[in-house]
Image (tube, coloured by chain):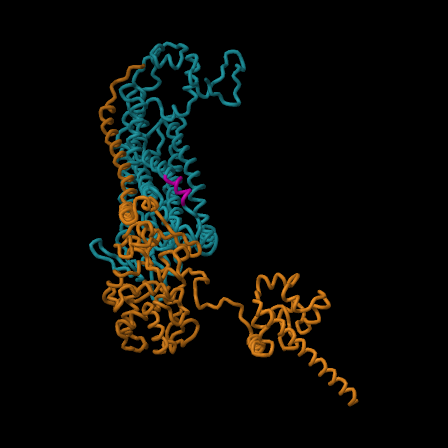
């Protein structure tokens, strides 16, 4: 039985041209079987052979794979939530309470979605850090490489990840959500001239209300995931086109050229090659047996370890880490302190530091800390591949001497961001006062 | 297959993959366990056993299992309390331990469970099916169960269960007195005795020296200055302490110290805490006028007609459609003919005597007298007599008017 594409006829269109089946269940000839294998996308997800050092745990730390695993997990856990959550100002909070308390496994599904989202922000960030430090956005000697563009795609995907998390933050419609979005959108409105319009567009009005919830919901459940999915596919495709990880480039560049025995030219079938009836050929030294392994099983096994491991870790965390759901959103009561989502807290911290009060005058830091600074950082990050002057030897390896200066500056910036995030998350209490971890915050009063 | 050098990975990675597999199995077991471990499963089994002991195995089969809830659409409440408190509506568990005890019948008469749910009176988190989060106090849920243990925590005087009266008064706030709400009734008396309205507006009436208290129950705990409050840091505790000694909490206040005792202060704190915009539809609130207001003229006119010679027609309801002009009764609608001449009209319109018509009416009157104004045989006799009286009065007035007119003509 053959599965053919609907627009392809079974009849040969010209002598010697045979129709290619999409898939054959029981191929009648080696040719048909070979064609079915060749045209199968799933079998070509990975290259046939992988450069061995690219599989090392301590080169890439498999952070990209872990990000993809988290994206998969978020999609899967998001589907049931899509059926259970009601994007209405009156009922959103109640529906989340229902998910939390009475839906079978609802609490766990929500926790998986939440922890997965937080982890994804962190893991995607770490992936970005890894790629920068190893200079992996630099092209090697391969033809048609566009690694710098894959880096740009990656930066956009990182921003999409942040925005996905941010839009998801509002959906439970509790105090945490409401005020995090208030802080976030107020920072956006500090952009001169267009700021208030941006805030107005984000909120669908002048205050956070049903229109905002609907906008964030549709962005969160449709536009952003679809956008991220498309970019993800392109990101993966580019890695194949660019010849795998930058580490392979390095090998190709630096390894001594070795001789590969030329095989006699012969027409042979794919399965003939597989069965050893056809002569062995070596196309490139990078696929030489001593430096490469078969993708199936060695690559697939490692990917399974990372993906399933990520799922197992998130699944277990979700049992023990409860997802918070605060009081229902209330525009009249500001929690003290009101905090943005944790990954924006370094910005909120900078906003607070740069807000200077001189006598009666207040210089608002929101524009500097919330717009200018992250704007510059994103701009620099995006165009860094074209600003980077280090040599090709600086790519595909950790801490190369060639990249010492830029890596140091980059790490310093990352360190500042991480420290400020930690301070903002754990050490800022009521009125944004500083508290050491061992100091207790003033008790939050309750109603009865 | 093409010969390849030995890959080091199968040997190294297979144990790792196996470990990941074990982790996956553990995580699956964990989340299945976390969903199963709720106490309500145990309580349901226990209650079933209680019913079996008391009423036999057959009856115990009718005990529902799984999460149960009362969904009160009007209030937006989904109360899952009955998942554990299964005995609430069963007779015969009056002395059983909680959560199996039967609910006292008296309060449920006026507040049927299906219309009010549980949390609208008792407080607590109806969404939850775990004792701790359902009962509270728990972070991020500001409505703990207003029961005995909370009353003990606040050392409520005399009646440890009195805190619940706060929720009574969310609906009953316009009652002067509410049955069973001793603390609230006491506080309402104090409100008038101590002249709170001298300084505070309550329900639209009062002075402006102090803050308007009409919705003070909505004020969030964060909005109170708790810096000088000792003990529990809650809005309720603040109110109690503040009522006992206002200056101790707010140094520059002008509110006098009324030397309230603990019970007075607790009762007043409950009262003010109950003044909130609860999402309660108007039909849940007694004491709220739900009629179209009448003008004073309309009220005076109705009172006059009720005490005049046409009082019977007003009381019986005839006047809704008919005027009886000879007796001074004027219908606002005037849908039917004037009954002053009913004795003649039945003859001219139906060819029947008024007695006959009242006893077996036709047309609209047949519908009215069979469905809306149902008269006993005795009342029918009264009706006929009253109609005759009205006609007699009509005739009298006519001749008087005729005489007056001829007298006027003679005078000319």
Taking the image as drawn, is residue B263 in sight? yes
Residue A50, position as x, y percentages in the image: 32, 24
Residue B285 sits in quarter: bottom left
Q: Quadrant of the N terminus of chain B?
A: top left
Which quadrant does the C terminus of chain B fall into? Answer: bottom right
Q: Is residue B238 left or right of residue A184?
A: left
In this view, A359 is above or below B193: above
Let me know if residue A122 is in the magenta part.
no
> Quick check: A27 above or below A163?
above
Q: Is residue B40 visible?
A: no
Q: Quadrant of residue A261?
A: top left
Q: Main secondary structure of the magenta part?
A: helix
Residue A260: horizontal and vertical position, in percent?
32, 15
Q: Nearer the viewer, residue A110 or B1?
A: A110
Q: Nearer the viewer, residue A434 or A354?
A: A434
Relative depth, front residue between A37 and A364: A37
In which image quadrant can residue A148 be found? Answer: top left
Residue A6 x %, y %:
52, 23
- Give the farthest residue toward the left: A438
**Chain letter of the orange region:** B
For the point 46% across and 63% down, the residue is: B282
Residue A83 covered by magenta stretch: yes
Number of numbered labels in the structure image = 0
Magenta-tinted stretch: A77-84
Name the colour assigned to chain A in the rendering: cyan
Left or right, A195 with respect to A106, comes to right
């Amino acid at each position: 039985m053959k599965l053919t594409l609907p627009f392809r006829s079974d009849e040969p269109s010209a002598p010697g041209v045979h129709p290619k089946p999409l898939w054959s269940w029981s191929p009648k000839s080696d040719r048909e079987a070979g064609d079915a294998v060749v045209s199968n996308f799933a079998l070509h997800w990975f290259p046939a052979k992988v450069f061995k050092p690219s599989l090392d745990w301590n080169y890439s730390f498999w952070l990209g794979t872990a990000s993809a695993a988290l994206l998969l997990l978020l999609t899967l856990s998001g589907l049931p939530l899509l059926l259970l959550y009601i994007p209405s100002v009156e009922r959103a909070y109640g529906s989340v309470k229902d998910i939390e308390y009475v839906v079978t496994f609802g609490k766990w599904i929500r926790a998986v979605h939440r922890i997965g989202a937080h982890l994804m922000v962190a893991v995607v960030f770490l992936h970005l850090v890894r790629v920068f430090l190893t200079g992996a956005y630099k092209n090697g000697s391969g033809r048609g490489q566009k690694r710098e563009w894959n880096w740009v795609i990656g930066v956009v995907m990182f921003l999409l990840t942040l925005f996905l998390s941010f839009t998801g933050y509002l959906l439970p419609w509790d105090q945490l959500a409401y005020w995090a979005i208030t802080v976030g959108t107020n920072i956006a409105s500090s952009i001169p001239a267009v700021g208030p319009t941006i805030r107005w567009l984000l909120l669908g009005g002048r205050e956070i209300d049903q229109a905002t919830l609907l906008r964030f919901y549709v962005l969160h459940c449709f536009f952003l995931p679809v956008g991220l999915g498309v970019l993800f596919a392109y990101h993966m495709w580019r890695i194949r086109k660019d010849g795998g990880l930058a580490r392979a480039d390095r090998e190709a560049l630096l390894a001594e050229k070795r001789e590969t025995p030329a095989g006699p030219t012969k027409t042979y079938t794919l399965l003939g090659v597989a069965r050893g009836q056809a002569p062995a050929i070596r196309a490139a030294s990078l696929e030489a047996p001593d430096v490469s392994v078969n993708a199936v099983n060695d690559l697939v096994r490692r990917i399974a370890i990372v993906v399933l491991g990520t799922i197992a870790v998130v699944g277990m965390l979700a049992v023990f880490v409860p997802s918070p759901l605060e009081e229902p959103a209330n525009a009249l009561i500001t929690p003290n302190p009101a905090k943005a989502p944790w990954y924006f807290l370094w910005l909120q911290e900078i906003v607070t530091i740069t807000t200077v009060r001189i006598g009666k005058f207040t210089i608002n830091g929101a524009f500097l800390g919330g717009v200018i600074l992250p704007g510059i950082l994103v701009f620099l990050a995006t165009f860094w591949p074209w600003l980077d002057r280090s040599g090709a030897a600086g790519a595909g390896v950790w801490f190369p001497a060639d990249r010492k200066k830029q890596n140091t500056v980059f790490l310093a910036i990352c360190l500042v961001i991480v420290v400020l995030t930690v301070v903002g998350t754990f050490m800022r209490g009521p009125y944004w006062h500083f508290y050491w971890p061992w100091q207790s915050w003033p008790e939050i009063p309750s109603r009865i | 297959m093409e010969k390849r050098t030995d890959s080091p990975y199968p040997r190294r990675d297979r144990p790792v993959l196996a470990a990941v597999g074990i982790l996956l199995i553990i995580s699956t077991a964990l989340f299945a366990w976390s969903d199963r471990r709720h106490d309500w499963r145990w309580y349901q089994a226990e209650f079933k056993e209680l019913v079996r002991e008391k009423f036999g195995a057959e009856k115990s089969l009718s005990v529902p299992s799984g999460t149960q809830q009362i969904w009160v659409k009007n209030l937006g409440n989904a109360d899952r309390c009955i998942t554990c408190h299964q005995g609430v509506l069963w007779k015969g568990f009056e002395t059983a331990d909680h959560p199996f005890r039967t609910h006292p019948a008296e309060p449920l008469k006026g507040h049927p469970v299906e219309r009010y749910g549980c949390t609208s009176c008792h407080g607590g988190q109806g969404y939850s099916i775990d004792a701790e989060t359902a009962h509270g106090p728990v972070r991020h849920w500001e409505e703990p169960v207003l029961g005995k243990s909370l009353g003990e925590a606040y050392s409520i005087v005399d009646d440890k269960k009195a805190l619940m009266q706060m929720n009574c008064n969310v609906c009953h706030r316009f009652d002067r007195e509410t049955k069973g709400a001793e603390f609230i009734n006491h506080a309402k008396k104090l409100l008038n005795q101590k002249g709170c309205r001298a300084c505070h507006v309550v329900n639209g009436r009062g002075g402006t020296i102090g803050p308007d208290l009409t919705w003070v129950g909505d004020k969030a705990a964060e909005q109170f200055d708790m810096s000088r409050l000792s003990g529990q840091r809650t809005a309720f505790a603040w109110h109690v302490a503040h009522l006992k000694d206002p200056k101790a909490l707010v140094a520059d206040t002008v509110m006098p110290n009324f030397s309230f005792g603990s019970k007075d202060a607790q009762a007043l704190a409950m009262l003010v805490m109950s003044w909130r915009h609860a999402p309660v539809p108007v039909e849940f609130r007694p004491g709220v006028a739900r009629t179209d207001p009448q003008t004073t003229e309309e009220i005076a006119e109705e009172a006059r007609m009720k005490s005049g010679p046409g009082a019977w027609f007003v009381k019986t309801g005839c006047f809704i459609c008919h005027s009886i002009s000879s007796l001074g009764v004027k219908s606002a609608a005037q849908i039917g003919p004037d009954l002053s001449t009913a004795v003649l009209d039945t003859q001219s319109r139906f060819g029947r005597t008024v007695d006959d018509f009242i006893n077996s009416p036709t047309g609209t009157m047949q519908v009215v007298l069979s469905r809306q104004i149902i008269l006993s045989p005795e009342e029918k006799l009264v009706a006929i007599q009253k109609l005759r009286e009205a006609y007699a009065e009509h005739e009298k007035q006519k001749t008087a008017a005729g005489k007056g007119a001829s007298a006027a003509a003679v005078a000319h």
